[in-house]
Image (spheres, helix red, strand yellow):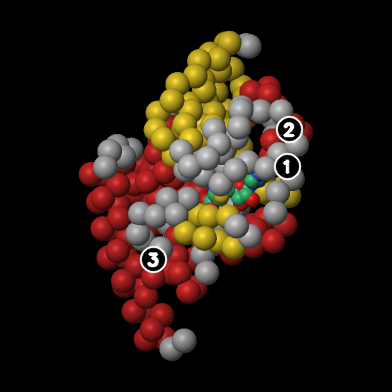
Amino acid sequence: MSALNVQGIGMTSQRTRDRLIARLGDEGIASFKVLEVMRRAPRHLFMDEALASHAYEDTALPIGHGQTISQPFVVARMTELLLESHPARVLEIGTGSGYQCYVLSQLVEQVFSVERLMPLHQQASRLIRDLGVSNVRFKHTDGGWGWPENGPFDAIMVTAAASSVPQALRDQLSPGGRMVIPVGAGDAQELRVIDHLEPGRFSERTVELVRFVPLVTGAR
Ligand code: SAH
C-alpha cells in the first residue's frame, strides 16, 4: 500500500471516528472519559484489513473463528457501567480482538484478559503490546474459572454470553466490586450488572438487551 493510501485511511478514520463518538453520545453514553478513549482507539487495527473501512460503524464485525468484535455502543456502555465502581484491577473474560481490552487499559490501572482460543489470544496480545500498552496481562484459558491466581478483582467484564453467572467469577469479585455480564442463550441476552455489596451479598439488575457469542466453558 502506498504512503498516500495509508494517509487517506488515517484521515477517513478520524472523521468517521468522530462521527461514531457523536452518535454514541446521542444514544446515551454519558462518560466523557470513555468517549474520549474511544475517539482515540484505533478500532480498525483490531480486525481484518478487508473490514477496516467499516471499523467506525456502530456494529459488531467478524474476527474469524466464529467470533466477533463487539459493537462500539456495547463496548462503551459496558465500560461506563464498570467504571462507575472505580475499579483499579479489572478481569476481562473473552479477549477476542483485544479492542475492549485496549479501551479498558486506557482507563484503569491493570487489566487481566483471558481468551480460550489460542490464535485470538496470540494475535490480540501481540497487537496490544505493539500499541505500547504495558498494563495488561493475558492468559490462554477458560475464563469461566476466572483467573484465581490474580484475584480477587475490583471489576469483572464478561464479553461472551453465559447461560448463568459462573460461581468462580462471583468468588473472584472483591466486596464493593462490580461485574458486567451478558446472561442468556439465543439472540437476545440480558446485560446484567452485579454488585458485590458486602462479603457474600450481591445485587443484580438488567440494564440492556444485548447479543454476544456464547461463553464456552466447563465452569458452572
Ligand atoms: N472483548 C472482545 C469480544 C470478543 S467475542 C472484543 O472486544 O473483541 C467473545 C470472545 O470470548 C471470543 O473471542 C471467544 O473465543 C471468547 N470466549 C468464549 N468463551 C470463553 C471462555 N470460556 N473463556 C475465555 N474466552 C472465551
Beta carbon at label 2 within 8 Å of ligand 1 = yes
Q: Earlier in the sequence, mark 1 or mark 2?
A: 1
Mark seen at residue 142: 1
x then y, percent, for residue 151: 69, 30
- Please state which of residues 198 and 141 is positioned toward the viewer in this rendering: 141
Residue type marked 1: Asp
| Residue on which disc 2 sits | 219
| Residue that badge 3 annotates | 54
Q: Amino acid at mark 3?
A: His
Q: Callout 1: helix, strand or loop?
A: loop
Q: Nearer the viewer, residue 197 or 59?
A: 59
Please, what is the three-letter code of the amino acid marked with disc 2? Ala
Which residue corresponds to the image point at 59% horizontal and 63% vertical from the top-left?
A: 64
Check if mark 2's residue and mark 3's residue have beta carbons within 8 Å: no
Image quarter of residue 120: bottom right
Determine the CA span between mark 3 and mark 1: 30 Å
Precedes in sequence: disc 2 or disc 3: 3
Q: Is residue 74 left or right of residue 186?
A: left
Label 1: few (<14), some (14–19) or many (≥20) C-alpha neighbours in 10 Å: some
Mark 3 residue's CB less than 8 Å from ligand 1: no
Numbered disc 2: secondary structure: loop
Question: Could you tell whether 28 is left or right of 183 in the image?
Answer: left
| Mark 1 residue CB less than 8 A from any atom of ligand 1 | yes
Among all residues in the image, which is located at the extreme bottom?
Answer: 2
